[in-house]
Structure formats: C-alpha cells, structure tokens
Amino acid sequence: MNNFFSYLKNVRAEMTHVVWPNTRVTIGHVFLIVLISVFTAAFIAALDYGFTQAVAYFIGG
C-alpha cells in the first residue's frame, strides 16, 4: 500500500511540470480535430459509395 501512495505522490510531482495549453490553443486544436474528422468521414463515405456502386455494376444489381 505504501508503494501506491508513493506512486501517487510522484504523479502529483510530475503533474506540476506539465505545461497546459491556454483556452485559445485548446479551442483551436478541438476545431482542427473536428475538421479532420469530418473530412476523413466524408472521404471514407465517398469511397464506400464508390465501391458499392462498382460492385453493384459488376454483379448487375
């Protein structure tokens, strides 16, 4: 049990060294992640639609 509390003490000490981003940077990163996710989803959806149409064409559906 002593090792667990020692671990938590070390974690707390290391967390003081972390440089946290400000609100503006955080919002910018969130916006960028959402934008990349939307473009990735649209790209995958376009590929899925294209492959579905190609398979339907080849099997005569």
Image (cartoon, rainbow, N blue to C red):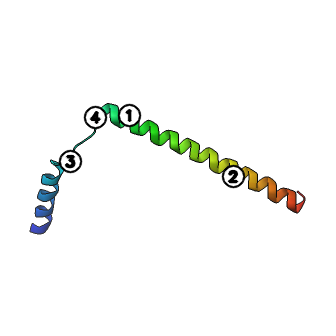
Visible residue check, residue 1: no
Q: Mark 1 — residue?
A: 27
| Residue at the disc numbered 4 | 22
Dot 1 or dot 4: first in sequence order is 4
Q: What element carries label 2?
A: helix
| Residue at left offset 13%, top offset 58% | 10
Amino acid residing under circle 1? Ile
* Residue 24 position (above or below residue 29): above
Disc nearer the start of the sequence (4/2)? 4
Q: Can residue 28 be seen in this view?
A: yes
Cβ atoms under marks 4 and 3 closer than 8 Å: no
Q: Does 42 sit left or right of 27 as displayed?
A: right
**In the picture, residue 9 is in which quadrant?**
bottom left
Horizontal relation, residue 34 to residue 51: left or right: left
The residues tagged by marks 4 and 2 sit, at their Cα atoms, a distance apart of: 38 Å
Q: What element carries label 4?
A: loop
Q: Give the structural element (helix, strand or loop) at label 3.
A: loop
Percent coordinates x, y for residue 4 in the rendering: 15, 65
> Disc 4 vs disc 2: Cβ atoms closer than 8 Å?
no
The structure residue drawn at horizontal position 18% and vertical position 50%, both measured from the top left corner, is 15
Question: What crowding class fits label 3: few (fewer than 14 Cα within 10 Å), some (14-19), or many (20 or more)?
Answer: few
Q: Residue furthest top?
A: 24
Q: Which one is earlier in the sequence, the residue at label 3 or at label 1?
A: 3
| Mark 4 closeness class: few <14, some 14–19, many ≥20 residues within 10 Å | few
Q: Name the residue under label 3.
A: 18
Q: Can you tell which mark lies on residue 43?
A: none
Q: In the rendered image, which residue does mark 2 sit on?
A: 47
Identify the element where label 1 is drawn: helix
